[in-house]
Amino acid sequence: MLHVIPLGGLGEIGLNAMVIACRGEMLLIDCGLMFPPVSSQGVDVIVPDFTHLRKNASLLKGIVLTHGHEDHIGALPFLLNEVKVPVYATRFTLGMLRHRLHELGVEADLREIEPRNPFRVGSHFTVEACRVTHTVPDAVGYIVRTPEGPVIHTGDFKLDPDPIDGLRTDLERWGELGDEGVLCLLSDSTNSERTHETGSERDVERTFERLFRDVKGRIVVGMFASNLHRVRHVLELAQKLERSVVPLGRSMMRNIEMARELGYLPGITDSLFVPLEHATVLPPERTLVLATGSQAEPRSGLSQLASGDGPLRLGPGDLVVLSARAIPGNERAVSGLIDQLLWRGARVVYPDLEPGVHVSGHASQPQQRRVLELVRPKNFVPIHGEYHHLHRHLNTARECGLAPEQLLLAQDGDLLAFEEGRGHFAGSVPTGRIYRDRFGQGQVTPEILQERTRLAETGIILAALVIERASLNVLTGPQLTSQGLNLDEQVLLTRVAEDARGFFLEMSRELRGDDARVREELVKAVRRAFRLYSTKRPVVVPMVLKV
Amino acid sequence: MLHVIPLGGLGEIGLNAMVIACRGEMLLIDCGLMFPPVSSQGVDVIVPDFTHLRKNASLLKGIVLTHGHEDHIGALPFLLNEVKVPVYATRFTLGMLRHRLHELGVEADLREIEPRNPFRVGSHFTVEACRVTHTVPDAVGYIVRTPEGPVIHTGDFKLDPDPIDGLRTDLERWGELGDEGVLCLLSDSTNSERTHETGSERDVERTFERLFRDVKGRIVVGMFASNLHRVRHVLELAQKLERSVVPLGRSMMRNIEMARELGYLPGITDSLFVPLEHATVLPPERTLVLATGSQAEPRSGLSQLASGDGPLRLGPGDLVVLSARAIPGNERAVSGLIDQLLWRGARVVYPDLEPGVHVSGHASQPQQRRVLELVRPKNFVPIHGEYHHLHRHLNTARECGLAPEQLLLAQDGDLLAFEEGRGHFAGSVPTGRIYRDRFGQGQVTPEILQERTRLAETGIILAALVIERASLNVLTGPQLTSQGLNLDEQVLLTRVAEDARGFFLEMSRELRGDDARVREELVKAVRRAFRLYSTKRPVVVPMVLKV
């Protein structure tokens, strides 16, 4: 019996974490986080609930990583704080992970692996990385040989006939496995709704060449620093155009530095780069700014340029390329960023105007179909996507001729069991999302999030009362103060305080000895008084002070 | 000298309000509101700042409305509370407005007009409505003849060769005006970035026919109740398919009722409709639900169906069509809604899967070009759009051969002056957005919004202190309580209170007489203590109670 247990990534984009378990041993594939939309009630990162792993810590024999993006490795430092097991990944992925671990002061047993080079994890798993093309170097999927048969996990992949690094998705290997017989295919669903083939990164390269050719001023490219293939061809293009590169944004600087250290930016020399402080003295037509902030994140490179706060001032003649799509939830912020940049007088090019400035890193429907037809798995579990993405991917598999009993539409926490070539739902394990405040400090529960939402929607009234301990007389109050009330409500507060005092004093003296009861009545009195004037219901927080 | 003064709609989608002023008289075209994204810090509607109109109330001679959508008429009740002038609109638009005014108890002098039938406003304006196709019946643009020449305001328009009501945009009239010479064209920019022609509403009709044909269960169409052309063809289709229609959602019921009263749903009889209470006993294959909630608004028709709270339960065999695009800011909520509906087992079709289930109500780039070429205005001001939409529309005009001095990229509050056929920027007037809480109650200033944002991001600590009036001794406190803090911070509060007491008691006795100073020091003491344990900075609200 083999178990496949998604702990994250099946029901959302991000949080990717998949457990393969057999005969008392577990293997974890990826351990990612998720970013909330820009400015989300103070929450900076979301990580999967690891209860299941924590409970079964002794069974976990290893963690394998598909590639170095945060949605695949970002939650690992939090997990490694609690669970000590070897982590296997390719060279570049380890490079990105090492940095994160170092930042957070977490130790780990890291082991470098190579595609097509099988290794053992525990006594029941033989794992083999399988090269895939994505937007970052050294991305792989995994073939996990188990006592019940081989499982293929594609990781994030695309089918690019001519990738920047020349390394194509290893379809051949998947095909060989298909011939051999695959127990279960777990395949990336991100673009399952897109019916056009996902284009090649070369298309972006060509678009950039065309756009950059006649620019007289500065060129600014705003993009994810994690899209290292694109970073690479922009740097090469800058070199060709004899423009010095100004990396803008912390993660851009860090990723370029790391990629160079690891040898993933061949031919890029030190002399290409100019720090921001010196960029202002360079002629604009000799400058290319490579900036973070394609999602309009505050304090990012692009936001700085848009606001005009930094030393570099954009203007007519300059070109800004937004080389990324807005992630759902960030559309408004990105629109605002574009407006600000246009307002500075620069030419701004973004995917809605010029689709060629961005291509996705994920295979689309026809390409997903190709993989399904190649692997012809006994069972298929769509992974990496919201429910509707998984659902559409399942339909694609159905269209490929898979029978209903071969299709498993699983969600986070589902326990899938496979025996004798067949899969079925066999229960569930605890899962969920853990929200964390800025810089990963402090856990925010769903209840706290709800509290914050209410604060933001209705504002808050604080009601304080001073009671004499001995006599139980109310010495003063309720005194009210507020935050976030609308203008009309603020004006009401004095009247509300008076009325609330009236209501409150009706409370019998005996009850005043019971602190919890006093607080409760205080809230009731304020609410009742407020309702005389308004239909809104602000949060009321009571404080009873005894002297 | 003629002035054109956008008070809203140039820099955002919504808030449309345009002043035309000449020789001491003003005409206002449209008076719209804007909805924030679903769940936005309690703010339900945004209206333009009317300071300029209020200050010049005696000069305002009339208000003309292009069509009955909220982003064109929704702010009018607020304005009419302060300014009494005649309001001119076509029959259906007046019908929609009457309803809003009635709801809010606002009186108005309403005057019905007809296309191609000029009327006077004040002594200097001759106004003529000009039929346009949009998503709602009886939509018009305006031709305003002024002492400086005619101005064309397109309103929201599309070029549909075969509209549902047979009434095409009156390009002929715009062409005639063009021959005559147009001082200024103000034209809808919403779709200026779309390079494909906006399709005909008939495309949606055909898609629906194809999708509905073989459905064995219920059919649910989720859409804007304001898209009355679409409501009409869905009703006609239901009639043809012999399905009873269940209107779901307040605005859907209201709009259908109003459209029928006004005769805009010919051939639709009472017997077609079934109230929700009776819908459960109908065979699913005889039912069609027409629901609000395409933006995943809480408490809307679709949300009810998705949550399974209502009497109608969706399941396998049922079809749900989401016939609208997510408005920027609502994408996440809409994705979640789709997931919920899929999870119920229904088939869900939405624009990403099947583009034919929705077409826009706005002309796109090639169609905007056609209007520009037809009118050949002396001056062009793109209207209705965010800055990047206006910017792209301006480029289209440039591509049509208009010279730079004919192009005016204006924003809300700009004062455009036209004399002797030429336009220029001549200053600005006060503008802005007024945020209003639920149901339009209570004004929320940008400062209050900021307060709410901070509350939601960091949470709040309330610090109360009791001081004896006579001795200025601290009797108790600071006592702390909180809302929205993360778990780690909540645990800290006792220690923070102790430390803060320490800091606070260092305050010299003389200063304790100054209430403002005491509050200030109290906040400082709490902040200082909090910083000993955390880098976060929650809002600290002080309360000093004297006994």
Image (tube, coloured by chain):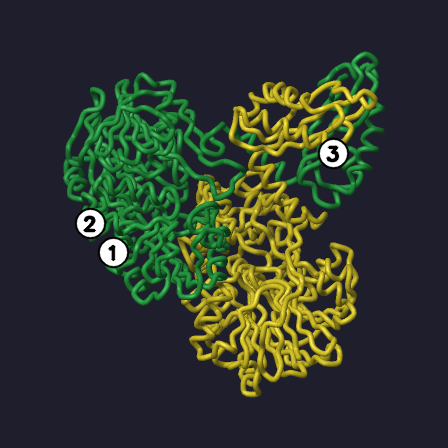
Chain colours: A green, B yellow
Q: Amino acid at mark 3?
A: Ala
- Say which amino acid is labelled 1: Gln
Q: Residue at x 23, y 38 (%)?
A: A377
Left or right of A540? Residue A232 is left
Task: Look at the numbered disc 2 and give the secondary structure of its residue.
Answer: loop
* Dot label at residue A209: none
Tag 3, which chain? Answer: B
> Which element is circle 1 on?
helix
Which chain letter goes with mark 1?
Answer: A
Are the residues under badges 3 and 1 in a single subunit? no
Q: Which residue is mark 2?
A: A267
Residues at marks 2 and 1 touching, judged by CB atoms closer than 8 Å: yes
Q: Residue at x 72, y 48 (%)?
A: B441
Residue B413, x across and y down, in percent: 63, 64
Q: Disc number at residue B516?
A: 3
Amino acid under disc 2? Gly
Q: Which residue is mark 1?
A: A239
